[in-house]
Amino acid sequence: MCHLYKKQDIQMELQAYLSQSQNPWFNQAIEEITFDNIEKNKLVLFIWQNRQSINIGRDQNPWNICNTRHAHQNHVSIVRRQTPGGAIYQDPGHTNFSLMGSTEQLSLSNIEAILQRLLTSLKINASIAQQKEIVANNRKISNTTSITVGDNTLIHSTIRVNTNLSVVDEYMTSNHARALSDVIDNYSNLSELNATITHAVLQRELVNAFCRNYGCEVDTQYIQINPLPPLPGLGEKLHFISSWDWNYGQSPKFCRQIKGRFSWGKVTLTLQVVQGTIIHIQCHSSQRYCALFNNFANRLIGYPYQAKSVMPVICTMMVDFSANHTELLEFANWLENELS
């Protein structure tokens, strides 16, 4: 326990949670549950890394902005957050941290002071920009955002330690990649200024800066995913935010056209999708297969826009249209790849 002095003496407890997991959904769940249940007169510092993932805004559509097939093939998670904003690529080269607590005791001036203490301890020649972000040689090393709910504030910052910025374009659609190119050119890594800095070093110095900023000791706790920490509602929150229904199913309405060329002809599918559910399909094929693919279109209405939901429909059709088994098998293999 410690005392902070503002307008009057206030007894304030400082807590640091250090995640040992790189599961992006677990870390997001910890952040949300901790903020939702923050205690009065308590300040929390949460520090973590994520494995390769694309963190998208609450209202974004992963199919429109991400190369979902390439991400899936390379085990890159697509993670929808609760807050708005753009897509962010993350890997273990990022160090993320959040400060949570009463708005009276936590403001952007606190994050500026903590970041400045951090730079001093690391002997880094950089400055803190107006947006409370670390800048060196006119390039951003960190990004900061904040939200206030009721009487509490959460300030989130991401520091690029040694992230691989060269792969960002691989996981974005061409239009979104071009929009990001100028932004990425203005980013840099902390390791370019000091090659000895690692996540472990940064984590230690962040906790120290947090402690010095408020002038008292910090209760530090390491958090693992197995077993789950005994935080109220954590299991339910983790289940929800890691689900397909949340990460994909909450997408705004969109239309996608895909074209396939097969040994027996061509097929063009135009699909309308609302909240991850197929609501309309138009199929164009040769006259010989019109009845077959119109039947397919009618069966697929109401199914989720994902391969594991569509494949059973085609398997059933292979029984009902046994004479077209070869065509449907080739079509299924193609469509599974398109929807993966």
Image (cartoon, rainbow, N blue to C red):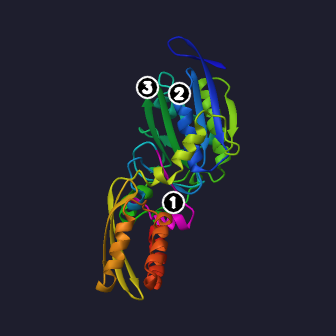
| 3 or 2: tag closer to the N-terminus | 2
Q: Quadrant of the N terminus?
A: top right
Give me the C-alpha separation between circle 3 and circle 1: 36 Å
Mark 3 residue crowding within 10 angstroms, few (<14) / some (14–19) / many (20+): few
Question: Which residue range is magenta in the image?
Answer: 65-81
Q: Are marks 3 and 1 in contact (CB under 8 Å)?
A: no
Q: Position of residue 303 (x, y in %)?
A: 42, 60
Tag 3: amino acid: Gly
Residue 223 at x, y percent in the picture: 68, 40
Query: In this view of the protein, which residue sits in the foreground, 80 or 258?
Result: 258
Left or right: 295 in relation to 331: left
From this view, report whether residue 44 is shown above or below residue 19.
Answer: above
**Looking at the image, can residue 55 be seen?**
no
Mark found first going from the N terminus, 3 or 1: 3
Identify the residue shown where x is 70% and y is 43%.
227
- The image position of residue 58, as x and y in percent, is 41, 46
- Give percent across and percent down for residue 125: 55, 44
Tags 1 and 2 touching, CB below 8 Å: no
Q: In the image shown, does 63 or 216 lie closer to the viewer?
A: 63
Say if the magenta span includes residue 72: yes
Give the residue displayed 32% in from the left and 86% down from the top. 288
- Label 1, label 2: how far apart the Cα atoms are: 32 Å
Give the Cα separation between the discs numbered 3 and 2. Answer: 11 Å
Instruction: Please tell me the numbered disc located at residue 165.
Output: 1
Q: Residue furthest front?
A: 320
Question: Which disc, if any, is residue 101?
Answer: 2
Callout in the foreground (3, 1): 3
- Whether 175 is drawn above or below 84: the answer is below
Q: To which residue does mark 3 refer?
A: 150
**SS of the residue under disc 1:** helix
Looking at the rendered structure, the kind of residue marked 2 is Gly
Q: Which mark is residue 11?
A: none
